[in-house]
Amino acid sequence: MLGEISKDFYCTRSKSPVLSCSESALCKMQGWKCGYRHRKYPTPEQFKEEYGIDYPDDGAVYEADIDQGNKPTWIIASYWTAKKMGKRHIICACTPWGMPPSDWRPE
């Protein structure tokens, strides 16, 4: 997919499959701190680190209870609802990558 750097990151700067973020001289010079490298599936805490603002309570999230050995079943909800329900894994639904795959785990 356009802008994909790895299984966990993508570049919002890259508009061309010829120039990906990982090949960008700007990113290499700044040590990946160019401001365009983002997580595909950020947690609300990672969202705050990357964008400098809290994820809104009415923002959409994917939530799942992930037990060892079991594949998660991701569902969509509001961040406020997920926090209130005490879900262990909450992923912001704010990127074009959609729901995390069933074998994906938060960092």
Image (cartoon, rainbow, N blue to C red):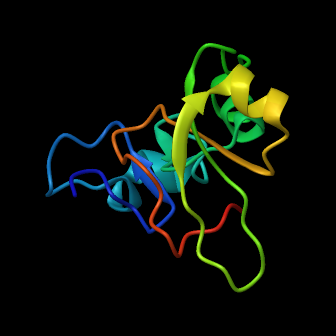
Image quarter of residue 4: bottom left
On the image, the x and y values in percent for residue 105 come to 64, 68
- On the picture, is 39 further left or further right than 15? right
Q: Does 1 appear above or below 71?
A: above
Residue at position x 34%, y 61% in the image: 23
- On the picture, is 106 further left or further right than 36? right
Residue at position x 48%, y 50% in the image: 40
Looking at the rendered structure, the number of numbered marks drawn on it comes to 0
Residue at position x 73%, y 20% in the image: 80
**Which is more toward the observer, 88 or 46?**
88
Single out the residue that lies furthest toward the bottom: 69
Q: Does 52 appear above or below 37?
A: above
On the image, the x and y values in percent for residue 13 come to 33, 37
On the image, the x and y values in percent for residue 49 come to 74, 33
On the image, the x and y values in percent for residue 60 come to 53, 26
**Which is more toward the observer, 59 or 54?**
59
Q: Quadrant of the C terminus?
A: bottom right
Q: Quadrant of the N terminus?
A: bottom left
**Which is more toward the observer, 1 or 86?**
86
